[in-house]
Image (cartoon, rainbow, N blue to C red):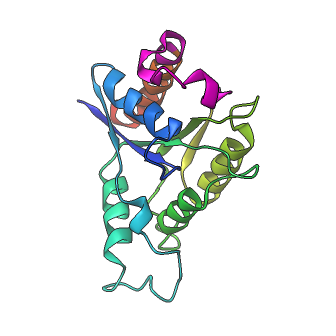
Amino acid sequence: MSVRILALVGSLRSGSHNRQLAEAAVKIAPEGSEVVVYEGLAEIPFYNEDIDVEGSVPAAAAQLREAVSGADALLLFTPEYNGTIPAVLKNAIDWLSRPYGAATLGDKPVAVVGTAYGQYGGVWAQDEARKALGIAGGKVIEDIKLSIPGSVTRFAEIHPADDTEVVEQLTEVIVRLKSHAAAPAAA
């Protein structure tokens, strides 16, 4: 059985280093796992309970919920914007936290990683994302972490998929997340 890991990228920029990191995860996913980058976060309207009504949920939000429902685990890639999580990622988490009492995240294993320009690699944003995901109903795997500092210089001339240290660390993240996702099936 292959474990399907859905990747959500918190940067919409085409040259985003977090996007490149997610692309690397797709490329290096070990046997028995598949990483798929979700496309379409930019199209999802800001969460508003008035439009989150059965039968008329915006198509982009419904597609996100469907993609998450079909995944065994989530892997979020987040930059750090002004010391916190990007709005597009927070908005996705808000949509996934509903419907109340039956959140789409539904105890799904979730890990948060990323890269940022600063010396700590975006740890504040990652911590904020973990907090929001946990409150939203996800099963946050707190000890799976990867913060890569200095993204602008580190990845100026090399794609993360070609950085041996990053590939090794990211592979470990995927293997560990896969084991958490596969654990309920084995029980």
- Residue ranking furthest to the top: 164
Left or right relative to 65: residue 103: right
> Residue 118 in the image: x percent, y percent?
74, 34
Q: Residue at x 27, y 24 (%)?
A: 32
Q: Is residue 13 visible?
A: yes
Number of marks in picture: 0
> Residue 80 in the image: x percent, y percent?
67, 45
Q: Which quarter of the picture shows residue 67?
A: bottom left
149 falls in the magenta region: yes
Depth check: 117 or 3 in front? 117
Q: In which quadrant of the rendered image does the N terminus lie?
A: top left
Q: Which quarter of the picture shows residue 155?
A: top right
Depth check: 43 or 180 in front? 43
Q: Residue at x 47, y 56 (%)?
A: 105
- Residue ranking furthest to the bottom: 50
Is residue 75 positioned above or below 180 on the image?
Answer: below
> Residue 137 in the image: x percent, y percent?
56, 57
Is residue 35 positioned above or below 132 on the image?
Answer: above
Left or right relative to 158: residue 63: left
Left or right relative to 102: residue 5: left
- Residue ranking furthest to the front: 157
Left or right relative to 122: residue 41: left
Depth check: 82 or 26 in front? 82
Q: In which quadrant of the rendered image does the C terminus lie?
A: top left
> Residue 41 in the image: x percent, y percent?
42, 60
In the image, the segment drawn in magenta is 146-168
Q: Which quarter of the picture shows residue 123?
A: top right
Q: Is residue 187 visible?
A: no
